[in-house]
Image (cartoon, grey):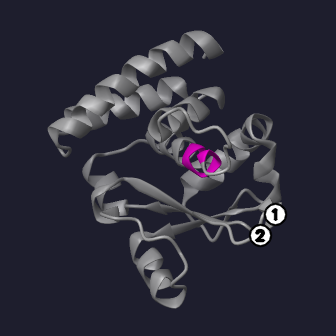
Amino acid sequence: MKLFHYTSYKEFNTFEELYKSNAYAVCNLLKKFSVNVHTIGEYKELLEQYPKLPVIEDIDKDLFGCYVLKETNDAKDTISGIIINDELCSQLKLTTNDKLAAIAHEIGHIMFFFLKNKQTDEEFKADEFACQMGLSVELFGLLEKLQKSDIYNKHTTRLLELRLKAIKKYRHYFNA
């Protein structure tokens, strides 16, 4: 089974080639469903066609976003997707490695949905997932770039600082 569906984005294809086995090793549940990939425009069209899909607030202001729709207890019935903001990615001049780290982080959000014990903040758990996959250096670089970009408010910028500190710990813990 393919990890991603409906994509012509080279970064998603590269991610699948390089990190699919890592993703499955970190979370075996991923083998039971595929992750759809959409542009913001495609996602907005889907919302009109499928009103049950979760609405992501302010999707235009984020690099990537994700959704999970689970109507049964069986993971194979899960519908999930990652939305990419091409315009913002271009504006920030994201590299392929930046995008690979963002993809791993978004998959981490999808996996967070399935956790029974959600004592950790979702952003930190998604970062941890990306680090477990071997993308801690790339994720650290991406978050530094976002922090310096001045596109986020003070609260989000502070959260980015905290996430960067956590990634340093994850890197030590996962030897990445």
Q: In which quarter of the image is the C terminus?
A: top right
What range of the chain is rendered magenta? 108-112
Check disc 1 and give the amino acid type: Asp
Please say if the residues under marks 2 and 1 sit with CB atoms less than 8 Å apart.
yes
Does residue 47 belong to the magenta stretch? no
> Horizontal and vertical percent for residue 112?
60, 45
Looking at the image, residue 29 sits to the left or right of residue 132; the answer is right
Which residue is identified by label 1? 74
Does residue 110 belong to the magenta stretch? yes
Q: Quadrant of residue 163?
A: top left
Which of the pair 72/27 is nearer the observer?
A: 72
How many numbered marks, from 0 up?
2
Please name the residue shown 53% across and 48% down the image: 106
At mark 2, the secondary structure is helix
Please name the residue shown 73% across and 56% down the image: 3
> Horizontal and vertical percent for residue 116?
68, 43
Which residue is identified by label 2? 77
Q: Quadrant of residue 52?
A: bottom right
Q: How crowded is mark 1: few (under 14 residues within 10 Å), some or many (20 or more)?
A: few
Check disc 2 and give the amino acid type: Asp
> Horizontal and vertical percent for residue 157?
23, 34
CA distance for labels 2 and 1: 6 Å
* Residue 66 badge: none
